[in-house]
């Protein structure tokens, strides 16, 4: 004999004097729950797959933004302040990109002003050197004139002494 597990329910109907008994095979009774279990598992699996897909797409987008920021940062560290980060979103990465670009513009402006100051300073230094060279040459020329004037004075004094000697000699004769 094959035994079959059943689920049973009974209902007493006293007015009619009967009892209704209903039996259903347990496999048949629980089939709905088994189907529901399969549907929940399939739906759960689909939700997990969708979640993984969303996380994958979001992480790829995030990593692409971070990679772009890294490349621009490397370029800036090499002295290129003209590069900019493309702003592709309105989230925190987009905000950071806008702030980073603003910082680069400020640095580039300050660097341009610094280059102007350096050129002005270099021109001032070059002018000062020319002035110093001119002053040194003027000192040398002035000293040369003073030296020649001293020599002429000494020569004139010597000639004057000689003329005085000749004049005394002419007076005594």
Image: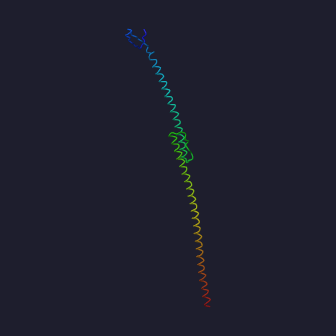
Image quadrant in which you'd find residue 150: bottom right
Seen in the picture, residue 65 relative to 49 is either above or below; the reply is below
Q: Quadrant of residue 2?
A: top left
Outermost residue, front side? 15
Instruction: Left or right? Give the position of 64 relative to 12.
Output: right
Say which of 93 and 64 sits in front. Answer: 93
- Position of 139 relative to 53 (above/below): below
| Foreground residue among 7 and 20 | 20
Q: Nearer the viewer, residue 58 or 172?
A: 58
Coordinates of residue 88 in the picture (x, y in percent) = 55, 39
Count up the numbered dots.
0
Task: Give coordinates of residue 30: x percent, y percent.
Answer: 44, 17
User: Residue 99, position in %: x, y?
Assistant: 51, 44
The C terminus lies in quadrant: bottom right
The quarter of the displayed image where residue 29 is located: top left
The colour scheme used to paint the residues is rainbow
Is residue 23 positioned above or below 74 on the image? above
Residue 90 vertical placement versus 11 (above, below):
below
The picture places residue 141, in percent across and down from the top left corner, at 60, 70
Q: Nearer the viewer, residue 24 or 110?
A: 24
């Amino acid at each position: 004999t094959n035994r079959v597990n059943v689920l049973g329910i009974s209902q007493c109907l006293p007015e009619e004097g009967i009892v209704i008994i209903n039996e259903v095979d347990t496999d048949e009774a629980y089939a709905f729950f088994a189907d529901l279990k399969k549907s929940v598992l399939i739906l759960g699996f689909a939700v997990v797959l969708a979640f993984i897909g969303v996380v994958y797409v979001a992480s790829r987008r995030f990593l692409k933004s971070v990679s772009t920021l890294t490349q621009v940062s490397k370029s800036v560290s090499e002295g290129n302040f003209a590069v900019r980060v493309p702003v592709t979103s309105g989230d925190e990465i987009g905000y950071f990109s806008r702030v980073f670009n603003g910082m680069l513009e400020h640095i580039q402006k300050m660097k341009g002003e610094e280059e102007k100051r350096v050129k002005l300073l270099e021109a001032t230094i070059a002018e000062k050197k020319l002035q110093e060279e001119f002053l040194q040459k003027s000192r040398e020329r002035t000293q040369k004139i003073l030296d020649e004037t001293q020599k002429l004075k000494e020569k004139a004094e010597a000639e004057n002494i000689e003329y005085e000697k000749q004049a005394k000699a002419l007076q005594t004769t």
